[in-house]
Image: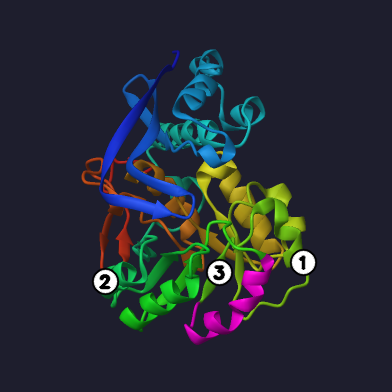
Amino acid sequence: MLRTLDVRNDSFPLIAPFRISRGVKSAAEVVTVSLTLGDHVGRGEAVPYPRYGESIEGTIDAIEAVRAALEAGANREEIGRLMSPGAARNAVDCALWDLEARLADKSVPELLGRPALTPVPTALTVGLDTPDAMAAAAAKLAYVPLIKVKVDRNDPAAQIRAVRAAAPRPRIIVDPNESWTMAEVRDLQSLLAEARVDLLEQPLPSEEDGELAGFRSVVPIAADESAHVAGDVAVLREKYQVVNIKLDKTGGLTAALDLAASVQAHGMGLMVGCMVSSSLSIAPALVVAARAAFIDLDGPVWLKHDREGGVSCTDGVMSPPRPGFWGNP
């Protein structure tokens, strides 16, 4: 019996504009893949990221290029050879995991020999804005476990101080999205300590992060845009203490699990992140998040309407999707 492939663009309007140093978005534009075999349908989702030269159209084209192989029965290992890391392979790989789970009548954690997914604390994001507006947003999150603060080069000290004053309790991740220089990383060290920041995420452009080699930061520094696949880790460990795994970068759950194993084997900390997305992107990321020190999976929280049956988030704690949604027949 042959599989059938469906690939399409879905759009999810946001409850408010999402601003980072690189720009602003008002909707989550995703690519959804469905693989049908008999009565079973496996699904996956990808968020193409212009930072890596990706687009909705290019991602769909990359998936269409392997249509014949997928419909003929190509497995995850074969797709890993046919497709490059990135959003397109992520959607396909996750759809294959979901289909495999449904055919076996087992959850993905069961297929991996792991415990069932349980609720986890996730970062909730304070988007880039004026310090006053960021303080107002942070005040609404004053009792969640973890806040992620988007900053840029326009007075990040004021932005960070405003958030910490409004929310003195949560752990904090500061994310400049590659917008700082090494001089700013050095100059802001005392502020990071003063504000009790727990993690600094990708402060420098990835092509300039060699400047971090040997630098002793007062808080751990996480690689995001600099980290894609397991082969990157040996170089990353000279510059970073934590690696942020995103399935859209690794090209799916299969490669994300390999990257997580390599990160831990090298004695580095594990973070799991996401793009602004629906729960269909988040469900497979939760499999990796079960072993992460920092979890940043609030993509669906920004949506006006998520996919039915997806994750839920209350006071910064995310619960897995309902049975039948993804990877859990």
Residue 104 visible in the displayed image: yes
The spot of residue 127 in percent (x, y) is: 37, 60
Quarter residue 120 falls in: bottom left
Do the residues under discs 2 and 1 have CB atoms within 8 angstroms?
A: no
**Image vertical order of residue 182 relative to residue 235, above or below:** below
Q: Residue at x 28, y 68 (%)?
A: 137
Q: Which residue is mark 2?
A: 136
Q: Residue at x 38, y 53 (%)?
A: 19
Q: Which residue is mark 3?
A: 200
Q: Earlier in the sequence, mark 2 or mark 1?
A: 2
Residue 199's disc number: none
- Image quadrant in which the N terminus is located: top left
The spot of residue 9 in percent (x, y) is: 36, 27
Amino acid type, mark 2: Ala
Do the residues under discs 2 and 3 have CB atoms within 8 angstroms?
A: no
Q: CA distance from mark 3 to mark 1?
A: 15 Å
Q: CA distance from mark 2 to mark 3?
A: 22 Å
- Image quadrant in which the C terminus is located: top left
Relative to the observer, which residue lies in front, 262 or 192? 192
Q: Earlier in the sequence, mark 3 or mark 1?
A: 3
Amino acid type, mark 1: Ala
Residue stretch in magenta? 182-197
